[in-house]
Image (spheres, grey):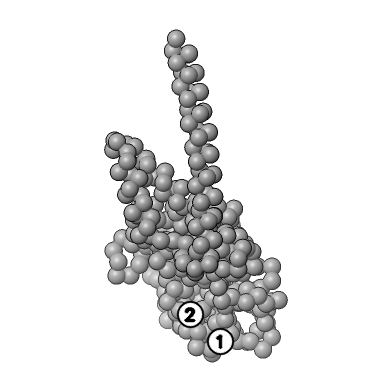
């Protein structure tokens, strides 16, 4: 008898599901008509006030706390799907998001000035040489923000800055600076990172009491450094700056974590090679330009957006990627200054701004976000 009742219940569910599917398709057809109206009148797809009114009305039709919550979630998703449909229809009528970006064949590499943070022998210097070649016109500045300012104000054509390390993760400060400054990611390059412990020519490991380096380098070599409990670790703005400091202060108890090249440049001895705990240690550097351009063949888009501070906001915005079959490569959150416990999100996706599906997804996110900025396509 129980098996028979279960079968009957399943048959009833099948009938309901068929009806729901039919009603869903009918609703989507009506949404198409709404989209046609919005195309003609220029009205935005997303009407937050109208959707909230609708959600309140349908939720009130439910009879229990469980079904009220479920009804809210169900209709939230139905409305999200209808927006995706309408964004696509608007795009097919030429009403796409203006990305302001222009496609170019490649970045100019001759008669250009390159700025990096740190001093000669830094990993930034190495990344700049790796991308632009050893004979490029390069110069250095003290901070990451200084480098962005050089590009923003036109004194440099490109800046080369670290954004992520395979061991220590994101260079968070640079994400914040990308929002602050009017610069764009035009390319990227990866540089293998191999840290050495450097000291004076007459120094020995047993002499060391203080170690200097950039915070990321200290993190990447923390297993080795923390094994020496009597060593004091002090942060500097750059690994090569740390090497230069040790060389200039000429104190046998001081050491730097930096590249062997930095050691050669500043006359330091390698006390220990390859001290980073991850031997496949790689840093990703971004190439920043003043102009919003992307190279032909670029296949990664970086964006930054802020959502409405409420449940489901991030999920709904990322749904624009899912609906357009776009692969998300990375997501990073950063606190919004002055707004406790609210965050902006940095997202990397596969694709090009020349792809209709990318533009469609960005249109959807821009409609639903408090703000959206395309950081680059590279």
Foreground of the two, 240 or 291: 291
Residue 188 on image: x %, y %? 60, 70
Which residue is depicted at the point 30% across and 66% down? Answer: 339
Whether residue 352 is visible, yes or no, is no
Dot 2 corresponds to which residue? 182
Which residue in the structure is indicated by mark 1? 156
Q: Quadrant of residue 177?
A: bottom left
Q: Position of residue 103 (x, y in %)?
A: 65, 75
For mark 2, give the secondary structure. Answer: loop
Instruction: Tell me where residue 246 sits by quadrant.
Output: bottom left
Of mark 2 and mark 1, the one earlier in the sequence is 1
Front label number (2 vs 1) = 2
Residue occupying image coordinates x 50% and y 64% = 38
Residue at (41%, 49%) from the top-left corner?
A: 76
Mark 1 lies on a secondary structure that is: loop
Front residue of 217/183: it is 183
């Amino acid at each position: 008898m129980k098996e028979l009742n279960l079968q009957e219940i399943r048959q009833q569910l099948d009938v309901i599901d068929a009806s729901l599917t039919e009603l869903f398709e009918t609703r989507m057809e009506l949404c198409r008509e709404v989209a046609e109206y919005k195309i003609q009148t220029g009205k935005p797809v997303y009407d937050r006030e109208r959707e909230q009114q609708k959600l309140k009305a349908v939720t009130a039709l439910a009879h229990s706390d469980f079904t009220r919550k479920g009804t809210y979630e169900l209709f939230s998703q139905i409305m999200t799907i209808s927006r995706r449909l309408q964004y696509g229809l608007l795009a097919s009528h030429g009403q796409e998001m203006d990305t302001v970006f222009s496609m170019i064949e490649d970045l100019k590499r001759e008669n250009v000035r390159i700025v990096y943070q740190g001093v000669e022998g830094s990993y930034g210097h190495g990344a700049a040489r790796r991308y632009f070649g050893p004979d490029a016109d390069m110069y250095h500045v003290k901070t990451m923000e200084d480098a962005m300012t050089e590009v923003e104000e036109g004194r440099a054509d490109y800046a080369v800055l670290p954004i992520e390390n395979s061991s220590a993760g994101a260079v968070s400060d640079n994400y914040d600076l990308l929002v602050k400054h009017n610069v764009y990611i035009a390319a990227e390059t990866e540089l293998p990172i191999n840290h050495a412990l450097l000291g004076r020519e007459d120094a020995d490991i047993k002499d060391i009491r203080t170690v200097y380096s950039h915070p990321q380098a200290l993190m990447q070599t923390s297993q080795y450094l923390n094994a020496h409990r009597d060593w004091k670790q002090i942060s500097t703005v750059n690994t090569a700056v740390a090497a230069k400091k040790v060389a200039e202060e000429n104190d046998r108890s001081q050491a730097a974590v930096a590249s062997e090249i930095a050691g050669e440049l500043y006359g330091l001895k390698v006390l220990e090679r390859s001290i980073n705990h991850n031997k496949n240690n790689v840093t990703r550097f971004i190439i920043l330009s003043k102009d919003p351009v992307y190279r032909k063949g670029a296949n990664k888009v970086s964006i930054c957006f802020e959502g409405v501070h409420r449940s489901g906001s991030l999920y709904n915005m990322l749904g624009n990627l899912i609906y357009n079959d776009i692969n998300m490569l990375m997501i990073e959150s950063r606190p919004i200054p002055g707004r406790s416990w609210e965050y902006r999100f940095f997202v990397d996706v596969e694709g090009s701004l020349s792809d209709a599906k990318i533009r469609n997804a960005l249109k959807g996110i821009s409609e639903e976000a408090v703000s959206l900025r395309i950081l680059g396509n590279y």
